[in-house]
Image (spheres, grey):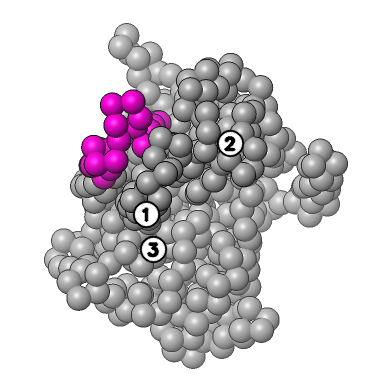
Amino acid sequence: MEDQRRQNSMKLEKLCKDGLSQRPIIIAANRGPFGYYTTEDGRLQVRRCGGWMMSILNNLAQHKEFSWVTSAMGKGDRKAAERAEGDHFKAPMLGRDVYLRFVSTPRNMYHKYYSIFCNPLLWFLQHNLWNASYTPNIDGVVYDAWESGYLTVNKAFAQAVVTEAKGNYISPIVMIHDYHLYMAPQYIRQALPDVVIQHFTHVPWPSADCWELLPKAMRVSIHTSPCNADIVGLQNRRFAQNFLHCCNCFLEDAEVDYHGQTVFYNGHLTHVKSYPVSVDAANLQKLNSSYRVQEYEKKLSTLCEQRVIVRVDRAEPSKNIVRGLRAYELLLEHHTEMKGKVNFLAFLVPIRTHMKQFQRYADEVSGMVEAINSRQGTAEWQPIHLFNEHITTHKLWQLCINTMCCWLTQSQMACLW
């Protein structure tokens, strides 16, 4: 394992030196690597954000400088953007020449973009969670969120990328991330014809049937813009094939090559690739020896005496948590001899709790846990132990799995994520 990590690090370093040494890199994502907040005495402080982007880019930051364009999401971010006077500034925590540029848009515009169009509309569509007989309801609110929220914020991101690119004498590589910024490639290409653009989507790309829930103009635009990128990246081959098929369905005159995984449209060739994203193994190893893990060992040791089922997930509707809990109750009902002998530990990370759809699902999970414990538990034994943790899922994964492995054999533990 250690040899493999060393080889991967050497490959990345060689790629940065050979392939990326001359071209600047600009990353555009709705969420940044850091979040700013103000203390009670008014001082501006920074804290590192977790999640997929930091896991992906931690190693890159050791070998290559880049700029990160991101939304000013809260008061602290907006204050930091004001201090920078619209310019980029050196990021305080990555250790190399990494620069941050905030995109600060009016709050109402950002609300339409993020809380009406991106989430829940796009997110639910791409996870195939709508009930097509009844939802989504594409009304005037949604059209307004598309026109004066989603498109406008994407234009603001594109302009920030263009401004960042003009500070370099060599055309940069622009790496755009996720469903928040589908329209950015088109706007950037119009301003910078020679730039290299990659767009990577971190959620599923569903079939054409799902996309047909959106009005034609929206779904055509969402597929047209990524075809201005040089590379469209998806998480796996099935999602890549879905994207190709959608382009074939929705983009008139698009030439789709399923075998070569390319789309030729409006005179531009786009390569469609699948890039599975791994965990940050080195960071997880470091975390394993931390004080926090030792504290979790003490906390969990009394719950891991016999057989244990461990679930680690974000508490959101695509994770099938409720039915997983119900399946555990069915196990106890059909095998009563397992009562008192099989504990279920559920480590869940609440996300987007300001949105009613996500809060409602989190409440449903909590209600299910309480109901199962009431029906199946005894005065001496509680079947499910729920941990709602406001730390990143990959850290929880490490804490739980490493801790469990200290005491349990593989036959004693089942892990679900």
- Amino acid type at image mark 1: His
Disc 3 designates what residue?
Answer: 127
The reply to whether discs 3 and 1 touch (Cβ–Cβ < 8 Å) is no
Q: In the picture provided, is 9 more to the left or to the right than 188?
A: right
Examine the image and state in which quarter residue 404 appears.
Answer: top right
Give the residues in magenta: 367-389
Q: In the picture provided, is 145 more to the left or to the right than 181?
A: left
Does dot 3 land on a helix, a strand or a loop?
Answer: loop
Mark 2: give few (<14), some (14-19) or many (20+) Cα within 10 Å. Answer: some
Tag on residue 224? none
User: Disc 2 and disc 1: Cα gap in Å?
Assistant: 28 Å
User: Disc 3 and disc 1: Cα gap in Å?
Assistant: 32 Å
Q: Residue at x 29, y 74 (%)?
A: 214
Disc 1 designates what residue?
Answer: 334
Residue 63 vs 20, above or below: the answer is above
Examine the image and state in which quarter residue 144 appears.
Answer: bottom left
- Amino acid type at image mark 2: Ile
Q: Confirm whether the magenta stretch covers residue 373.
A: yes
Mark 3: give few (<14), some (14-19) or many (20+) Cα within 10 Å. Answer: some
Q: Residue at x 75, y 51 (%)?
A: 20
- Amino acid type at image mark 3: His
Residue 16 position in % (x across, y down): 77, 47
The reply to whether discs 2 and 3 touch (Cβ–Cβ < 8 Å) is no
Disc 2 designates what residue?
Answer: 401
